[in-house]
């Protein structure tokens, strides 16, 4: 297994106007992340890839293309989580056979699952696939909150190596890292990366790294070196960019920024809005000129 620490891009996926996967565009996004953003890894099949609107076969297609394009150049993490446990197992087996370095799975959502049910979900995917697992905790979307003792229960399974922590509770983050120092934590909120890095996270997984990966690495490395003023200055610029992206439409704007660099980033998948208005395209060009020239 490759080193999974560092800057990992939550991979965007290019779609055609009819919603089908644009393989050429997806390959270009992967190359841009590896060659220009210099990321340490790719998190494939997450929220940023519009994963939860895809069929099982489409998810497999993306896993296959990403592995074929990236080869062994960077670490590859396959997000296989689903409310359908059978789908998670099928995807987990498929990604493992392809040679993905690790699996990840969002906590099962929508229904109010008990912690025992959540633990069984992870243990079952691991038992069926034999691969390592990263818990994907994103409570503001799933409604699932995991406490310090519950992380300890999950970590009794030696195949669970850590958590993608997409939450603003940095007290919890610090307590989890303190309690389980041998387990990894990846920060999931790009706009709070410096705060997480100061608390000793092992890396970060972010959607804006598709276009802002170089700055993300600078923030992370400066924080590790104790150069907090330098890291803070870069986080300020990063957050100005993120603020603009969020106000204009997250995924569509990142895709537009990629297009402005010659990448065939395509459309978003409906029921998301497929493309930006001309006014929003113009604003994306302003963001590009100001922050990513």
Image (spheres, helix red, strand yellow):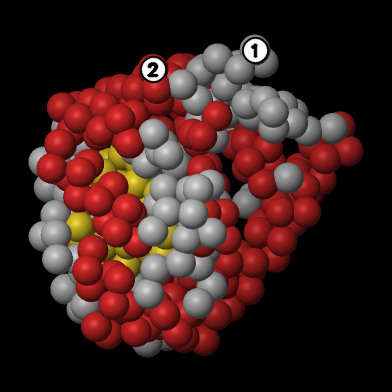
- Left-right relation of 162 to 57: left
Question: Image height check: is 264 above or below 17?
Answer: below
- Left-right relation of 37 to 16: left
The residue drawn where x is 64% and y is 67% is 239
Q: Nearer the viewer, mark 2 or mark 1?
A: 2
Task: Give the residue pinned by disc 1.
Answer: 18
**Foreground of the two, 77 or 160:** 160
Instruction: Give how far across and how far down residue 225 sits, in percent.
Output: 33, 82
Q: Earlier in the sequence, mark 2 or mark 1?
A: 1
Task: Give the residue pinned by disc 2.
Answer: 57
Instruction: Give how far across and how far down residue 52 sits, in percent.
Output: 51, 34
Question: Image height check: is 66 above or below 123?
Answer: above
**Foreground of the two, 255 or 196:** 196
Instruction: Give how far across and how far down residue 227 sits, in percent.
Output: 42, 85
**Foreground of the two, 115 or 141:** 115
The residue drawn where x is 57% and y is 54% is 141
Can residue 2 be seen by looking at this rendering? no
Element carrying mark 2:
helix
The residue drawn where x is 82% and y is 40% is 280
Instruction: Give how far across and how far down residue 199 sits, in percent.
Output: 38, 82
- Please tell me in which quadrant of the rendered image residue 274 appears: top right
- Please tell me in which quadrant of the rendered image residue 126 appears: top left
The residue drawn where x is 67% and y is 25% is 270
- Please tell me in which quadrant of the rendered image residue 45 appears: top left
Can residue 185 be seen by looking at this rendering? yes
Task: Give neighbour class at mark 1: few <14, some 14-19, many 20+ (Cα, 10 Å).
Answer: few
Measured Cα–Cα span from mark 2 to mark 1: 17 Å
Task: Give neighbour class at mark 2: few <14, some 14-19, many 20+ (Cα, 10 Å).
Answer: few
Which label is found at residue 144? none
The reply to whether callout 2 and callout 1 are in contact (CB within 8 Å) is no
Element carrying mark 1:
loop
Question: Image height check: is 157 above or below 236?
Answer: above
């Amino acid at each position: 297994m490759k080193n999974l620490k560092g800057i990992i891009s939550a991979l965007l996926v290019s779609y055609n106007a009819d919603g089908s996967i644009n393989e050429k565009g997806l390959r270009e996004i992967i190359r841009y992340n590896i060659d220009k953003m210099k990321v340490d890894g790719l998190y494939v099949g997450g929220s940023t890839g519009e994963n939860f609107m895809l069929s099982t076969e489409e998810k497999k297609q993306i896993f296959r293309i990403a592995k074929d394009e990236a080869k062994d150049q960077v670490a590859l993490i396959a997000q296989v989580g689903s409310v359908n446990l059978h789908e998670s197992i099928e995807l987990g087996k498929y990604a493992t056979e392809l040679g993905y370095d690790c699996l990840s799975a969002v906590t099962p959502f929508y229904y109010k699952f008990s912690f025992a049910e959540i633990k069984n979900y992870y243990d079952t995917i691991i038992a069926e696939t034999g691969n390592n697992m990263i818990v994907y905790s994103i409570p503001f979307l799933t409604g699932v909150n995991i406490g310090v003792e519950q992380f300890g229960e999950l970590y009794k399974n030696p195949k669970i190596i850590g958590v993608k922590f997409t939450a603003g509770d940095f007290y919890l983050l610090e307590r989890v890292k303190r309690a389980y120092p041998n387990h990894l934590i990846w920060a999931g909120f790009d706009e709070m990366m410096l705060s997480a890095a100061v608390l000793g996270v092992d890396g970060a997984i972010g959607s804006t790294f598709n276009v802002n990966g170089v700055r993300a690495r600078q923030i992370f490395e400066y924080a590790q070196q104790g150069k907090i003023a330098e890291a803070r200055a870069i986080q300020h610029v990063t957050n100005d960019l993120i603020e603009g992206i969020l106000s204009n439409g997250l995924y569509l704007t990142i895709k537009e920024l990629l297009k402005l660099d010659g990448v065939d980033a395509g459309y978003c998948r409906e029921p998301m809005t497929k493309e930006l208005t001309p006014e929003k395209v113009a604003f994306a060009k302003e963001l590009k000129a100001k922050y990513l020239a």
